[in-house]
Structure formats: C-alpha cells, structure tokens
Image (cartoon, helix red, strand yellow):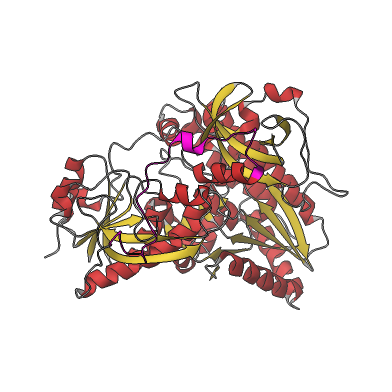
Amino acid sequence: MRILILCHAFNSLSQRLYCELGARGHQLSVEFDIADSVAEEAVALFRPALIVAPYLRRAIPASIWRQHTCLVVHPGIVGDRGPSALDWAIQQGEQSWGVTVLQATGELDAGPVWASECFPMRAARKSSIYRHEVTEAATCAVLRAVERFSGGAFVPIPVDPADAAVRGRARPPIRQADRAIDWQRDDSAAVLARLNAADGFPGVADQLFGEACRLFDGWREDTLHGGPPGEVIAWRESAILRATVDGAVWIGQVRREDQASAFKLPATQVFAAQLKAVPEAPLRSAANDLAPAGATWQDLRYEEAGPVGFLHFDFYNGAMSTRQCQRLRSAWQWACRRPVKAIVLMGGHDYWSNGIHLHCIEAAASPADESWANINAIDDLAEAIINSESQLTIAALQGDCGAGGCFLARAADLVWARAGVLLNPHYRNMGNLFGSEYWTYLLPARVGVEGARTIMRNRLPMSATAGVSAGLVDACLASDPDAFRIDVARRATELAVAPELAARLRAKRAQRHADEALKPLASYRAEELAELQRNFYGFDPSYHVARYHFVHKTPASWTPRHLAIHRDLGWSVPR
C-alpha cells in the first residue's frame, strides 16, 4: 500500500515505523504536520491508501480524516485521552501502561481502536520508556492495525468510557505546577518520579543557585547524602548532587530560563562558577575510577566476566563532548591493559553513540573551534579502537546509533546490534557535514566503495536487520534488552575462549599492518579533516545553521525532500 506518515517530526518512533513498514513492502512518504494546508496538499499529491500518525502535537484536520482512514498512535492505554498520557503514568507510578492505535475522529484520542499493546512500566526516564517500551508496543500495534486495514474485514472497536473494563480516562495536560518538586517534603523517590516524567521535554521548572531553570536527567544516589534539602552538595563530571529529605539525587542536565535562546546542557557546565564552592565527589576505587559503584550517577563503568571486559558509557542522548571522548579513550586504554581477551563496548541503554556533542559545541565561545576539538577527540578514540591489537573488540549496540557514532562502532572488529535499534549512518542531514571517525577507511572495507557511497547519500534510518544486509553490522541479536545483554556476554565469552582466537588476532594484526602500508590512517584522517575544516571554518555556513536549528529545536518549516517523495518533481501516482 501507499502509506503517508504524518508526524510533527521524524522522531525515533516515526523512524522505526518507517523502517518496519518499508521492510514489508509498503511505499512510504513522510510529511511534517506544519499546517492544515500542507497536510492536505501532501494527501492530494501522494493519494495514500492509509495515513499513519505516530507523533503529532495537534489534531488531524477534518478535511483529511473524513476522507481517509488515519491511524493515530497514542502512548496510553485504551480509553486514555489527553496529551500528557505517559507523563501522568510515570509521575503517578502506574505499574503497567500501553499504546493504543485509534482512528482519527472529531474528538481527540476518542476514535475507535484498531489495535493496542500493554507493557509493564519500568522506573526510568520518560525518554527511555518512550524509546523502548512505547516504541516496541507501538510498532507491534501499528503493524497489526495495518494488516487489519489491508485485510478489509476488521471493524475498529469504539471505546465506551462507562465500561468498567476500560481503565483509561481523560486527563488534562500536565502543567509545571503538577510537576513541581517540594524539596522540603518530597523524598528521593518522589523527586525522581517528577524528573523522570518530564525528561526529554519539558523538564521540571525549578531553581538552582537562585536561578530559574529546567531540570532533566535524574539519577538515584544510595550512599552520598547530607545537607539541607534542595541544596547542591556535590558534583561529579557533568552532574550535580542535590539533597532530598531522605538522601540525594543526581541531576545531569539543566536549561536556564533566563535566556530566550537557552538549551539543555550538562549541569556542571551551566553552573561552573557556582560549583567552585561545592565539593567534588569523584568516583574512585583502589585501581581505577570505572568500577561499579552501586546506585549512583556514573557515565563510565567497567566490569569483567571471566575473559571478557565490558566498558559501558552512558552519555545523555548519545552525545559525546570533547572531554567525554577523552575520558572514554583513557578508559579504553586502561581496559586494554587488563588481562582479558575480548573487550565489549556497551554504550548506554538508550543510545550507543550519536557522535560529537552539538549542544556543547553550540554553547562554546567559538563553535567552530569546539567542533574541531570535538571531532579530533572522537577521532583519537576511534584510532585507539582500530589499533587495539591484543584483544578482540566488539561494539554491542543496545541503543540507537547515529552519525559519527555508527563509524565509531565500526572501528571495532565486530558490531552486534539489538533488534529494534535504529542506525543513521550518515552526516549530510547536519548541513552537509562530511564527517570523520575514519569512515572513509572503515566503511568501504565493510560494504565496498559503491555500498559506502549509497549509505552516505541515503540520509534515511536503517534497521539493525538492514544493517546486517548492507554489511555495516555483523549480527542482529535479541530485541529484549536483557536478553540482548545476556546473548552478547555469551557470544563474547565463546569467542574469547575459542582455540582459534590467537590465529584470529594474528590475522587482525596482519590486516591492519597491510592496510597501514597501503595507506596510513593518518592520511585518511587528514583528508577527512580537510573537508571538515571547510564545514567548520569555510564560507558555507550550512553546518552551523543546521546545528543551531537542531539544538534550539526550531519548528520545521518544510519536510526534507528525501522523506517527502510525493514532492519530488518526478513523482507520479502508479496506475
């Protein structure tokens, strides 16, 4: 079928459905919901058999839903209505939740149901639950609804709010007053529930050091506490520790309210001057600063299981600043000195890596200089991984991966991805950025010159399965995150104890030395950086403009042509 995806933005759920529906042979086009007239024009041009709306911030106009079946994805259980479904569910401690696919009508979220899925709730940030449980449930429900629509026999089920079996209900939009933290009364669990429910967007309105700001990225702390409730009592790397009535919580990201152009940044960067009077709480053990430390905020963590070392790096939204790249490189070098035979780069639960940190770059005195420093730091990290000769190296993508993060992963000997993970292995959407991370060396070696050219020009998301087919990924493993981690550990251990490991490592060293003799890594890097120097310092400001709009979340004024195929000049409706 021809299916039009109508969405506010091409977010993670929209991308996942794009990949899943496309893999099933449907012809897809995307239109951003900018205005009624724009959506109407898209429908007239594409003439879809079905419209799927996975992420909207306003109602579909009657001129469309009266003429076409429109399937709206609502992140709530059957009967739930309102724009803050997931926020309320997290903040009020719902034990189970779900996703409903309903037909658009004149009443918001009240149309008949085409499909629904439920899932147990996890104590986590809204952005994390949306990326995992909501996305998985929505994918299952949408695929079932599309099959039912295609079959033609299914009749969507109206919802009767008076039905005792219907647990959902209409809820008002959640306000900042509903999210407010009372530091003199709320315990750590209540504080975290509010932070989790507002994470991603819009954050919790509060004050730090007397300044109005929004708080994001809350983490539990088990051992460090003390000080008056609400006071900042310590800091570590990019996060600050704030006392509660029964302990303390970490806050990783904040956004100032006093500047119209403010955006999310690491908490310690925003309040660097004020934190000079606050003690640091570095994470240390007898040997290193990477050992597990219980429930605390820890963006780097290392653990060993027999012959395998696991290096976790959980950076907010997968963005890696200059310092984070440098710290991860130091951690990698330390792990390489451990008596292990394989090292697995685990990334974080939600993201593996999305490359350089555009927010920190935007906030720098010279974004061009910080872009240069950041790209060189991530190149140093990639080079360290490429040149690791004594262990088998594995990138285990339990979360999404984009831009330079995809090629940083490819620096490892093997790349294993969790089914359901999305890859965006390209840079062009960021103002035609050329990219680095040695992609000109790593990608053609895996997929061929023509395959590399296709991937870099595509500008579209790629599923883990498609990544395997393209040669970018070596294996697609279990979709359940826990099952994925167990499978990764088992496979890595099997490879580490295999009799052929020594021969495998010898072959790896020989290949690297042969590649170096043919063309040194330094040459690939110099060529990539020459292109990037033009992106950062040249006359064309496209990268800086695109980064600004990305960081400041500027509303889209048009849909990119690689998504809106119905707007191509050569588009014609098949007869």
- Magenta stretch, residue numbers: 160-188
Q: Is residue 299 left or right of residue 475?
A: right
Residue at 19% in and 73% down: 152
Which residue, as the protein is rendered here, is positioned at the far bottom? 499
Between 541 and 291, the one lying in front of the other is 291
Q: Is residue 27 above or below residue 377?
A: below
- How many dots with numbers? 0
Decide if residue 371 is in sight here.
no
Residue at 50% in and 25% down: 257
- In the rendered image, residue 256, in percent from the top left (x then y), is placed at 53, 26
Between 171 and 541, the one lying in front of the other is 171
- In the rendered image, residue 360, in percent from the top left (x then y), is placed at 56, 33
User: In which quadrant is the N terminus drawn?
Assistant: bottom left
Based on the picture, tell me whether residue 168 belongs to the magenta stretch: yes
| Residue 311 image-quadrant placement | bottom right
Residue at 19% in and 46% down: 61
Q: Is residue 205 above or below residue 480?
A: above
Q: Is residue 511 left or right of residue 455?
A: right
